[in-house]
Image (spheres, rainbow, N blue to C red):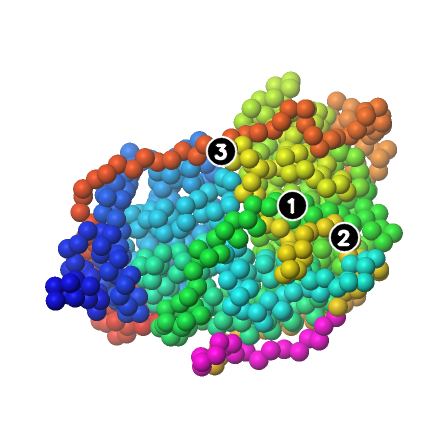
């Protein structure tokens, strides 16, 4: 009888809070119960605290109090400040912004970066901190919960840039592999079927599905769904996250995907049709990304308890275990060649079908980009509508944009676009570097300071592959070597010589050379790879799977002139829940944007001159080879000299450097000391609004039941 009592399931949050067991036993009992289906309501803050290891909580709160008393707000060396300009007070959180909360968020993140400099700041942290400073009025309590989420809930290494962000991308790949199994109809809508040129066999490419699922997962998981859910729904997800961990977030993401599948497929069909080039790989990538953005744009109230029950009790979700996909995800994400093949394919679009994209064409493209940019960004719509100005086909414009919009934001930094086009131009290395210099010389002075040069090369690394974070870590010695005459400024000739000669830049040049090559690349010869602790070149990148049969990637050209792109029927799917046994639920009528009016080339021909207030770059001195040669040789190396040097050299650049480029990164691990402090007891002091007459809602915040942060 005693044994039966010991194993009896918890029936209420009161029972959980009264448990006297050790931490592990308490959590085991909690996971075996069904309390995840019951809202803790006013007991939520205390319940969350009881789900944190007391030793971790004690150490963390001691660190916070010590750091705050010492005003430890400066970031440790090697860490970049977080984006303080990011506005997280949008959507459901819009009415909750106060100067005091903004200050708390900044302090919490800065102190955490000092606590864990090996993690640093990453996208999503500010969103998580914003929710916590609203729930917990005591700043130290919010910090403890924040640290627990980042260090213990997320998989180890999720927010770290080391090892090619493998930990994060492995989890996103697990989510994508689960979605392949659970949402086959969505997979079909994002699968390209085509005939490669010169071949009569149809092939399949599910890259659009892979990217769409990973990008959805990135937004949902990194922000813990805080950007797409109302507060009351969000906190119920967090209740279960604290109980079951990160694996629950992946499972709930699949449930949410099933809820929105019909809407997402309709977005994809409309967007693909509006591009007017058929269901190509690039058009489906853009369509999937547009569908993702529209899906996340307007949060709606969900039947959250029904969705939670579905995630916990429906057999097909209950049986899902991320461990079953872990090995496959690790293997896929350890292959790195996808990005290289994507850049090569984009290069063929720019240079193929009788087109030329050399030095002057790149300068012309820079001029067009200056005319369509807004606040330093170029939107996908403006870019594709300007294909006539670029003198490109629509297919080329779509390929270029999908290549450099690596995070699926539907907009790209002006400098990153210029840098990408400079890299892909059909010119020698010195000319590529010259174009890069011009692109980042914003004041057109012909000079950059060494810090700007380092930022330029870091940007080029991101342009080549946003997963890479090698150059910035090894750039410090380069700063002093860049400015040879120590006048604080770097002219073009100094820039070209240093980049070509300095070993810190060798990996970037190796990658650029690999793009120009048509040969199979030896992984260890490709320098733009961050070595792991053991010096291996593993844990790198995801492959582009041409089909589900596991066929390998190849550099086949997919020109429409010779090959065949399908033009599928664009019937729309009914918006419905696709899981059997679940009621159909409306999507609350998300307003669709009709972009068909943008599909014609004629529309792209009008209304895209220089925007008011945007200074057009004076490229006249750069527009001809003769003009460049006439510039003062002390500031700019002449084109003639560069070409002569190129002809005299045996090769412009080779894939194999004389010195092997291997950098080992040793993240600083924070040693945890065992403490015996009891769990923190959180008391939420009365709000200033308590004395007001409570005319709505269920707590002293006077909010509605849909937006209440406690109930």
Pick the quarter of the image with the N terminus.
bottom left
Q: What residue sits right under mark 1 in the picture?
A: 337
**Which residue, as the protein is rendered here, is positioned at the far left?**
2
Tell me residue 166's x, y (percent).
51, 45
Q: Which mark is residue 507?
A: none
**Nearer the observer, 327 or 34:** 327
Tell me, for residue 556, which label it has, or none.
Answer: 2
Q: Circle 3: is it few (<14), some (14-19), or many (20+) Cα within 10 Å?
A: few
Q: Residue at x 44, y 34 (%)?
A: 667
Label 2 sits on a secondary structure element that is loop
Q: CA distance from mark 1 to mark 2?
A: 14 Å
Q: Which residues are magenta?
A: 567-583
Locate residue 696: give its quadrant. Answer: bottom left
Query: Is residue 578 on the magenta stretch?
Result: yes
Residue 406 vs residue 148: left or right? Answer: right
Residue reaching furthest to the top = 485
Main secondary structure found in the magenta portion: loop
Marking on residue 533: 3
Give x and y (percent) for residue 552.
67, 52
**Upstream in the sequence, badge 1 or badge 2?**
1
Above or below, 586 relative to 605: below
- Image quadrant holding the C terminus, namely bottom left
Toward which corner of the image does residue 264 lie, by quadrant? Answer: bottom right
Is residue 143 visible from the viewing direction of this image? yes
Tell me the residue at 70%/25% (across/down).
497
């Amino acid at each position: 009888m005693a044994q039966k009592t010991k194993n009896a399931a918890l029936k209420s949050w009161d029972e959980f809070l009264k448990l006297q067991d050790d931490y592990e036993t308490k959590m085991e009992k909690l996971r075996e119960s069904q309390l995840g289906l019951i809202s803790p309501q006013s007991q939520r803050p205390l319940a969350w605290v009881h789900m944190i290891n007391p030793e971790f909580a004690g150490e963390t709160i001691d660190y916070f109090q010590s750091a705050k008393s010492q005003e430890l707000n400066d970031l440790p060396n090697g860490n970049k400040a977080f984006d303080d300009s990011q506005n997280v007070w949008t959507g459901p959180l819009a009415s909750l912004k106060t100067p005091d909360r903004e200050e708390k968020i900044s302090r919490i993140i800065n102190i955490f970066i000092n606590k864990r400099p090996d993690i640093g700041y990453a996208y999503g942290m500010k969103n998580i901190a914003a929710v916590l400073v609203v729930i917990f009025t005591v700043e130290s309590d919010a910090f403890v919960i924040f640290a627990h989420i980042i260090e213990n809930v997320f998989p180890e290494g999720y927010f770290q840039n080391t090892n090619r962000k493998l930990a994060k991308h492995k989890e996103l790949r697990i989510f994508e592999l689960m979605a392949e199994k659970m949402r086959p109809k969505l997979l079909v809508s994002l699968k390209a079927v085509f005939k490669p040129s010169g071949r009569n066999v149809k092939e399949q490419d599910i890259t659009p599905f892979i990217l769409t699922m990973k990008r959805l997962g990135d937004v949902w998981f990194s922000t813990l769904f805080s950007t797409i859910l109302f507060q009351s729904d969000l906190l119920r997800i967090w209740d279960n996250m604290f109980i079951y961990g990160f694996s629950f977030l992946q499972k709930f993401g699949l449930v949410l995907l099933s809820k929105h599948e019909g809407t997402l497929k309709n977005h994809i069909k409309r967007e693909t049709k509006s591009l007017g080039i058929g269901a190509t790989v690039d058009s489906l990538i853009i369509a999937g990304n547009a569908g993702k953005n529209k899906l996340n744009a307007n949060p709606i109230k969900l039947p959250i308890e029904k969705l939670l029950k579905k995630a916990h009790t429906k057999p097909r979700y209950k049986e899902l275990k991320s461990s079953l996909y872990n090995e496959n995800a690790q293997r896929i994400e350890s292959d790195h060649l996808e990005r290289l093949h994507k850049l090569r394919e984009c290069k063929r679009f720019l240079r193929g079908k009788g087109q030329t994209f050399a030095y002057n064409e790149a300068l012309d493209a820079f001029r067009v980009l200056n005319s369509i940019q807004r606040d330093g960004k170029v939107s996908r719509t403006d870019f594709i509508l300007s294909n006539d100005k670029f003198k490109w086909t629509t297919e080329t414009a779509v390929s270029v944009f999908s290549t450099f919009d690596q995070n699926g934001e539907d907009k790209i930094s002006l400098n990153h676009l210029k840098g990408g086009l400079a890299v892909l131009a059909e010119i020698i290395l010195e000319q590529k570097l010259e174009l890069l210099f011009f692109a980042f010389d914003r004041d057109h002075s012909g000079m950059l300071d060494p810090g700007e040069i380092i930022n330029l090369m870091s940007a080029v690394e991101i342009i080549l592959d946003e997963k890479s974070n090698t150059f910035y870590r090894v750039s410090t010695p380069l700063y002093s070597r860049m400015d040879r005459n120590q006048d604080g400024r770097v002219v073009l000739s100094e820039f070209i010589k240093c980049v070509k000669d300095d070993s810190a830049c060798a990996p970037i040049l190796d990658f650029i050379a690999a793009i120009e090559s048509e040969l199979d690349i030896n992984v260890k010869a490709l320098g733009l790879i961050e070595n792991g602790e053991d010096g291996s070149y593993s844990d790198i990148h995801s492959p582009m799977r041409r089909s589900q049969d596991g066929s390998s990637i190849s550099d086949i050209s997919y020109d429409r002139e010779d090959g065949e792109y399908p033009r599928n029927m664009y019937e729309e799917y009914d918006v419905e829940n696709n899981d059997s046994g679940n009621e159909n639920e409306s999507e609350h009528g998300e307003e669709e944007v009709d972009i068909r009016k943008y599909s014609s080339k004629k529309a792209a021909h009008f209304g895209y001159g220089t925007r008011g207030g945007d200074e057009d770059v004076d490229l006249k001195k750069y527009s001809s080879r003769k003009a460049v040669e006439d510039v003062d040789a002390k500031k700019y190396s002449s084109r003639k000299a560069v070409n002569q040097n190129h002809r005299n050299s045996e090769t412009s650049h080779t894939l194999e450097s004389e010195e092997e480029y291997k950098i080992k990164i040793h993240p600083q691990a924070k040693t945890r000391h065992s403490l015996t402090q009891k769990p923190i007891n959180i008391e939420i002091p009365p709000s200033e609004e308590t004395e007001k007459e409570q005319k709505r809602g269920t707590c002293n915040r006077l909010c509605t039941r849909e937006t209440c942060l406690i109930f």
